[in-house]
Image (tube, rainbow, N blue to C red):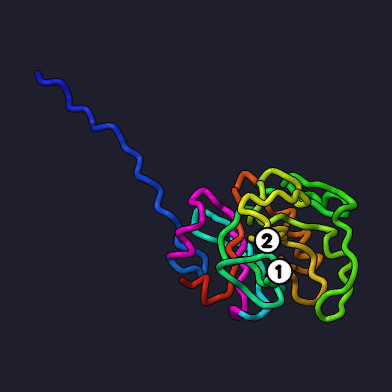
Amino acid sequence: MRPPRRAPPCTPRPAVPASPPPGLGPRTWAEVPRRSRQVLVVSGRDRNAPVSTAVLYERTGAGWRAGASRPAHNALNGWTDHHREGDLRSPIGVYTLTDAGGRLPDPGTRLPYDRSAGFTAGGAGFEGEPLSGSFDYVVAIDYNRRPGTSPLDRTRPLGPDRGGGIWLHIDHGGPTRGCVSLGRGPMKELLRALDPAREPVVVMGDAASLER
């Protein structure tokens, strides 16, 4: 009697990447790490405008779940693919979010949080608005910086000419020098939502560039 045939061993199929969140084209989406399960999309009105919207997407079994759409500001002159120190444009791209900090106590984030008086802001913005409190809460955008360090760290791996110190921070009511700013409430919500285990990234740029 012939022995019963054994079923071939099961070979797990590779995971099918989820479709991208709305507004992200194939070139942009290809830059997002496949392990990332939190994607903050900051979409600018146009390449030369300082106003944007920000939406945090969370990866679920059914795809990407969108959070609330929040108004945001970016740099005075808009966006650029080739950011330089002092150009007053925010860098377009996909960047990890690994470190947080601020002048105020940790609001409950799971990111490493550096509370420091070094986050004290002063002076006035481009429209005469006071900057006080803008850095009460910040998340470092990992553009030209060392992940795993305080947002205050000034190491610039690409060199100082490429700029740096690009943060998510509290909105002061006007354009920034290169950062992205959100309202105080949404900024605290974002800090509490970001989870290093979900490998969060920010995808940022003007809408037309993100659709590439």
| Residue 122: image location, x then y, percent | 90, 66
Q: Nearer the viewer, residue 110 or 139?
A: 139
How many marks can you see? 2
Residue under label 1, please give it: 86
User: Relative to residue 144, is residue 212 depicted above or below?
Assistant: below
Q: Is residue 178 above or below residue 128?
A: above
Q: Residue at x 72, y 46 (%)?
A: 110
Between 206 and 159, the one nearer to me in the picture? 159
Q: Residue furthest left?
A: 1
Q: Position of residue 132 (x, y in %)?
A: 90, 67
**Is residue 71 shown to the viewer in this render?**
no
Q: Would you say 36 lies left or right of 102 here?
A: left
Q: Is residue 196 above or below residue 171?
A: above
Query: Real-space Cα distance between discs 2 and 1?
Result: 7 Å
Q: Position of residue 209 (x, y in %)?
A: 52, 73
Q: Residue at x 52, y 70 (%)?
A: 210
Question: Mark 2 highlights which residue?
Answer: 163
Q: Is residue 65 visible?
A: yes
Which of marks 1 and 2 precedes in the sequence?
A: 1
Residue 148 picture location, percent across and down: 69, 43
Q: Secondary structure at mark 2?
A: loop
